[in-house]
Amino acid sequence: MRPSTKSESNSDSCLRGRVSEITLVYFEDMDEYFHFTFEFQISITRWVNIDDDHRERKKSKQVHAVFVRLHKISSIVSVGYNGFENQAHKSDPSRISYEQIVTDVLNALTEMGVSTSTLPVRKAIDFLIERNSTRIYREKGDPEFNFGKLTVQGKHGSGIEEVLARIFDRTSIKIDQRELVKAAKEALASSSMNSVLAVWKEEKLVSRIEFWDIGAEFLFVWRRTPQTYARCFEVFGLIRDVLRSFEGANSLGSVLDSFQIGQVFRAADIANSIEIRLEDLKNLLIEAVKLGLIVPAYRLRTQLIVQDQPNEWTENLSPLGRSFSLEDGSVLNGKDPKNIEIGFLKPKVGKELRSAEIAG
């Protein structure tokens, strides 16, 4: 969520939401963000054993804390809270959901003069998936179409679009896998999807994401990864960077769409094909590398034949860090950055299609 204004507030303020009472109990102006701590009461309904043969439902109230960070640079509002047991039936008017809690907090912030707007998280994720970003893949999803609904889950690093494409491996229909993956991505982008299980490869995090009208809820799963807020905010920052890349006529998508997957291109190639300042283009390419939409490629900067190996593009810079003999008898020092040419290429589609399972 994105705030449009920032303000301090009275720590004694007490505001009532739809089903819970939200109270601001702490506020601090930190170097990088404003910190708010709210408290709210929830009604817990649970079965309690009376004796060996009897039990009854009892209600009790518990106080829970909600931690809000309003980041000054990125303008992102994050709302953090612990899960709680809630055995009340969905029709019980006392039942409180996590979405209701966040709504109450946002209402409280609005009363304090901090208005927010929803970040289109799914739009950012679809953008990364569509362009084969190396930063993320969707391990599980529940796409819903007007003709039916699926629950799809990949195995061993396969995204759900690769699972759908792999189905046709078991049939007599022979279709190019890359085209199938592309078609599956387009179909998934047009579906309604309430939640996904996303794997953030660089951060080594897994998150279940539920898409709400007011925002998106991230439930992070820590798979042998240090449990720190910093890693979570790396994910949020990535999403914010993606949304910023949509801005302008020469947006990241429009610049990269003109090049084929596996095709190496240089900054000069793009600058010659569209009207954009070279400095702006370099910034866009740096952003694209950061988002995992393109990967750098390297080769020796020379028009001469290299004696001991072909001068081909490589994603691994290390083998070029030595001296090379050229056809005219001269020696080229690969450790000198001036002797290295830098290009870029798009990641391949469905580089490794592995086994997967489908439930639907």
Image (tube, grey):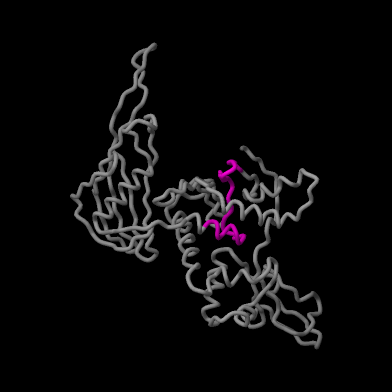
* Towards the viewer: 240 or 169: 169
Q: Is residue 151 magenta?
A: yes
Q: Is residue 183 above or below residue 277?
A: above
> Would you say residue 11 is visible in this rendering?
yes
Q: In which quadrant of the rendered view does residue 289 lie? A: bottom right
Residue furthest toward the top? Answer: 53
The magenta segment is 125-152
Q: Nearer the viewer, residue 293 or 51?
A: 293
Q: Is 184 placed left or right of 107 in the picture?
A: right
Q: Quick check: 247 left or right of 58?
A: right
Task: Give the quarter of the image for residue 200.
Answer: bottom right
Residue 7 x, y percent position in the rendering? 25, 61
Quadrant occupied by the N terminus? bottom left
Residue projecting furthest to the front: 146
Q: In which quadrant of the rendered image does the C terminus lie?
A: top right
* Residue 224 seen by the camera: no
- Residue found at x 59% / y 41%: 148
Q: Residue at x 64, y 79 (%)?
A: 269
Please state the horizontal and vertical placement of residue 358, each as a whole percent of the image: 64, 40
Residue 36 percent across, percent down from the top left: 29, 53
- Residue 256: which quarter of the image? bottom right
Left/right placement of residue 45 relative to residue 143 reads left
Looking at the image, residue 254 sits to the left or right of residue 350; the answer is left
**Percent x, y for residue 10?**
19, 54
Residue depicted at 31% across the width and 24% down the height = 58
Count all numbered tags in the image, as a single digit.
0
| Nearer the observer, 314 or 187 | 187
* Magenta stretch: includes residue 227: no
